[in-house]
Image: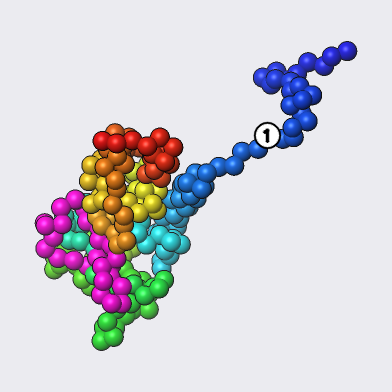
Amino acid sequence: MLNAAPMGKLARSTEQQSLGPDRFTPSSIAVREHRNRERADRIIDQFVERFTEKDFFPDDGDEALFALLVQLPEWPADLSIRIHNENDEVLAIFLKGNDESVVQNSVVLMQNADAYIVPDNIPVADDEPLLRWVFSQLPVGSRVGMGGNFPGSHSDSGRIVTLREQIAGLANDQRPLLFDALVAAGEGASKVQLDTRTRNPFLPLWIRQQTLLSAALSELCALYPQVPVGRLEELLEQLPLTV
């Protein structure tokens, strides 16, 4: 007596069964993309769920923080965030728009390994040191972090509380765009580099050590902005194109 295969499945022949279980090895680009996507989801979850907590910062979420900061409505379009290393070399630039020529002022942060440092002659508060350093460099009259409706909301401490709420809310409201930007930034993308592509506002304006795109890859990026750059690179390796 023959047993019927379960509904929705096809019975495998004896020859197929002898070959062992099906095997699939993803490409290195697919693995990298998967890890980038997992990382992006994890970072956004931490912003949405925990960024309102005092002194909390998502693991590996620095670039996401700066990208969110410059997209807040109160952040001036002519104010950039510049990340430098200890040799004063620029590592990354974040800006609300795409045109660096509009910049009038910059918040400068110096990165040392996994931390940010300030000049030796400047005192640093014990609580919220990074955000307080950002606030200390804002232009006079800046509205960043304003809008709170509680006692002390206009002080630096109160504005930081409000700022954290605003950033968590923006990460939640703009999750799809932020997710795409984090995945693309994980591949080294920036607004300047992908100048033929629909620019995601949450991408950094510029990042150090980025590679130039070939003409063919740039054209594919323009035609298919929703596809990760790594996938398009893989396609070109398999099917070389010219433009």
Q: Residue at x 33, y 35 (%)?
A: 241
Nearest the viewer among 70 and 220 is 220
Q: Quadrant of residue 147?
A: bottom left
Q: Residue furthest bottom?
A: 121
Quadrant for residue 65, please give it.
Answer: bottom left
For disc 1, the marked residue is: 22
Please determine whether, in this image, residue 197 is positioned above or below residue 100. Answer: above
Residue 67 in the image, given as x and y percentages of width and height: 30, 55
Q: Is residue 94 magenta?
A: yes
60 with respect to 25 (left or right)? left
- Give whichever of 2, 79 is nearer the camera: 2
* Residue 103 appears anywhere in the view: yes
**Residue 124 part of the magenta-drawn span:** no
Quadrant for residue 95, please give it: bottom left
| Residue 46 picture location, percent across and down | 45, 55
Residue drawn at x 74%, y 32% as measured from the top left:
19
Chain part drawn in magenta? 82-107
